Image (cartoon, rainbow, N blue to C red):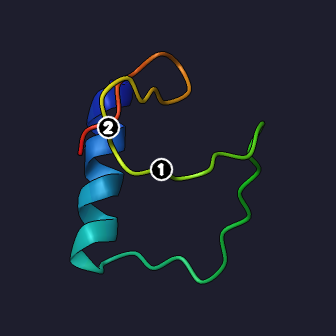
Amino acid sequence: MLEALFKTLLHRLMTGKVRVKELALQFKEEVTPTRGGEGDRLPGGSEARP
């Protein structure tokens, strides 16, 4: 049920049927973008892709 709702909202956002004028986001930590390289890790243990 929740996945269907997410997909519907995402589709409406991507097709322009719903617009977001202002979006306030809060991040737990600051993430500095880096160039992908061997051994680079993203928060959560994922590997960065070049």
Residue receiving disc 1: 34
Quick one: 41 or 17, which is closer to the camera? 41
Residue at the spot x=26%, y=69% of the render? 14
Q: Residue furthest top?
A: 45
Residue 31 image point, x, y percent: 64, 45
Q: Quadrant of the C terminus?
A: top left
Asked where in the image residue 7 lies, by quadrant, the reply is top left
Task: Report whether 49 appears left or right of 40.
Answer: left
Identify the element where label 1 is drawn.
loop
Residue receiving disc 2: 37
Task: Report whether 31 appears left or right of 5.
Answer: right
Name the amino acid, label 1.
Thr
Residue at the spot x=39%, y=51% of the render? 35
43 lies above or below 10:
above
Residue 2 image point, x, y percent: 38, 27
| Classed neighbour count for the residue bearing mark 2: other residues with Cα under 10 Å, few (<14), some (14–19), many (≥20) | few
Residue at the spot x=27%, y=50% of the render? 8
